[in-house]
Image (cartoon, grey):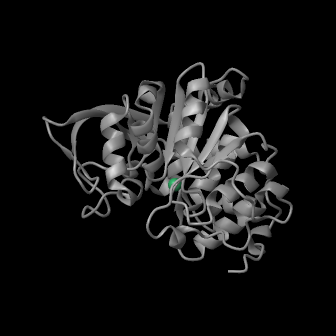
Amino acid sequence: MTAVLTQALRFADLDSPTVVFDSDLGHDLDDTIALAVLAKTVRNLVVVTNDEPLARPRAQFARALLDAMGRPEVIVVAGHQLHGSEDRFLMDGVVPHSTPSFTDVAAVLAQVCETSTGPVIWIGAGPATNLSTLFVTSPHLIEKIQVTMQGGWLDHYRRPDRASHNPRMDPAAFGLMLRAAHQPRLVFSTHTNIGTLAVTTSSPLYAALTAPDAPPWTRLPAVHAQRWLAHRPSSWMNDPATVAAALGLPVVDFATETVRIAPDARLHRDPHGRQIQVSTSLDGPAVMNWISTTLALPDPQSGSADHPITSGR
Ligand SMILES: [Ca+2]
């Protein structure tokens, strides 16, 4: 755990690497937890949203959460829309309306990468649309961007008939990104869809977020937790685990595999394919401990989890 915290502290420095968080914030709860952890950890942070509904509410949600966490300087870029995006946004009615300041993904992210003195750490926590766009418009930046993306599986998955969520939402973008990226790493869904990463209404994290004495910044995450868990048994902390891996925390092991990328974004072993880095194991309890330590939420008062705030949904 000490090694985990020491590594994370490296990103608090003024001259620490730029980290881009590319997220479909406002669907599964794990993006919100990942952004909160990043806001507490990374000095040079940029957020870009993907799978945006038409009004770009994910960017508005990111802006509101970052402002509430005392990070108004973090740039938020409203990214691309995908078919059906509206059905994958749970925070209608609670996110303050604001007009996103930045909407040109290719131009803004190219400038972010060009002005960064060192490599840019890109955390793919949603479909790959933004990154594939950037690769097409600014291929000279490809070697400068270190990609760690959540998603994919090999050999076994709970739904072997399809790719996992992030690759599947935009399979062409995923295929292009994975072929073009410089030494990309995938944190497989096989390793993040695990019990030790599951947050439920019985979890300490849920109780801490929804407690009456929780800090003010938890208001939106608490609503999000209630809305997601009203219809699902749990939220796996896929994206916080990917953040941890991207920041170099010793919680995910990787190995090189040679794979073929199918048109539907599924990966298959193929000796004539291309080499990518994929996760081989993940320490779920270490990730959960890191989340808890980083967010530093007070222990909820006894019984407070029985009185969650009203979500209005
Ligand atoms: Ca996500």
Q: Residue at x 58, y 68 (%)?
A: 89
Is 255 placed left or right of 283 in the picture? Answer: left
Residue 260 spot, x, y in % from top left: 20, 43
Q: Residue at x 33, y 35 (%)?
A: 180
Whether residue 152 is visible to the viewer of this picture, yes or no, is no
User: Which quarter of the image is occupied by the C terminus?
Assistant: bottom right
User: Which quarter of the image is occupied by the N terminus?
Assistant: top right
Nearer-the-camera pick, 22 or 232 = 22
Q: Residue at x 23, y 54 (%)?
A: 263
Nearer-the-camera pick, 185 or 80 = 80
In the image, residue 82 sits, relative to residue 79, either above or below, namely: below
Whether residue 292 is visible to the viewer of this picture, yes or no, is yes
Residue 80 spot, x, y in % from top left: 51, 55
Is 189 placed left or right of 145 in the picture? Answer: left
Residue 286 spot, x, y in % from top left: 56, 41
Nearer-the-camera pick, 115 or 15 = 115
Numbered disc total: 0
Is 223 placed left or right of 247 in the picture? Answer: right
In the image, residue 255 sits, relative to residue 228, either above or below, namely: above
Task: Determine which quarter of the picture holds residue 37.
Answer: top right
In the image, residue 152 sits, relative to residue 202, either above or below, namely: above
Is 208 placed left or right of 236 in the picture? Answer: right
Residue 157 spot, x, y in % from top left: 30, 57
